[in-house]
């Protein structure tokens, strides 16, 4: 700022300059602190890391979708198996009867 004419003008100008310098110094100090912070270095890498991982993220999404489909298919198969239990019981009874008949024939 340019010095003002009149009483107190020079003092106001000096104060304004000091405030401006203080703000600039604090800004520089904050910039140095941020630049020297280890976490800041990691944060700077983050956008690059995210871009590098985007294909992995897409693949993970596809795998999760396929996993959901496989789980649903497996669930349907289990349901069908449970529906077949009465038939399985009948088949087991028939096999048991055949086995008993076979033993009886061997004993004769």
Image: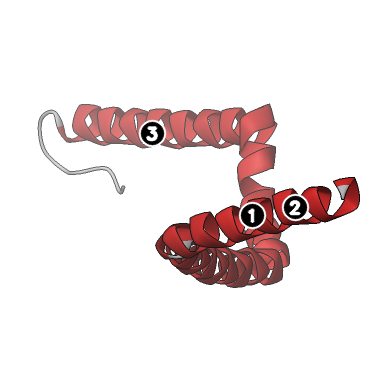
Per the image, label 3 sits on a secondary structure element best described as helix
Evaluate if marks 3 and 1 touch, with contact meaning CB atoms under 8 Å apart. Answer: no
Among numbered discs 3 and 2, the one appearing first in the sequence: 3
Tell me if 24 is positioned left or right of 35 in this view: left
| Image coords of residue 13 (percent x, y) | 26, 36
Q: Residue visible at 75% across and 52% down? A: 99
Q: Give me the C-alpha separation between circle 3 and circle 2.
A: 97 Å
Q: Residue visible at 31% across and 47% down? A: 1
Residue that carries the numbered disc 3 in the rendered image: 23
| Image coords of residue 11 (percent x, y) | 22, 27
| Image coords of residue 89 (percent x, y) | 51, 54
Q: Is residue 39 visible?
A: yes
Q: Residue visible at 60% across and 60% down? A: 94
Residue that carries the numbered disc 1 in the rendered image: 97
Residue that carries the numbered disc 2 in the rendered image: 99
Evaluate if marks 1 and 2 touch, with contact meaning CB atoms under 8 Å apart. Answer: yes
Front of the two marks 3 and 1: 1
Among the 4 quarters of the image, the one containing residue 86: bottom left
Q: Nearer the viewer, residue 46 or 95?
A: 95
Please, is residue 93 above or below residue 30 in the view? below
Q: Residue furthest left?
A: 7
Q: Nearer the viewer, residue 41 or 22?
A: 41
Q: Give me the C-alpha separation between circle 3 and circle 1.
A: 98 Å
| Image coords of residue 29 (percent x, y) | 54, 28
Q: Residue visible at 70% across and 65% down? A: 56
């Amino acid at each position: 700022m340019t010095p003002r004419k009149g009483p107190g003008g020079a003092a106001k100008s000096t104060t304004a300059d000091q405030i401006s310098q203080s703000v600039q110094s604090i800004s520089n100090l904050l910039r140095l602190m941020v630049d020297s912070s280890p976490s800041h270095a990691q944060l700077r890498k983050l956008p690059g890391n995210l871009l590098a991982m985007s294909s992995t993220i897409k693949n993970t999404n596809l795998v999760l979708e396929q996993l959901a489909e496989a789980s649903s298919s497996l669930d349907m198969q289990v349901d069908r198996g449970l529906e077949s239990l009465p038939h399985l019981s009948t088949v087991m009874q028939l096999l048991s009867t055949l086995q008993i008949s076979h033993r009886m024939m061997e004993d004769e």
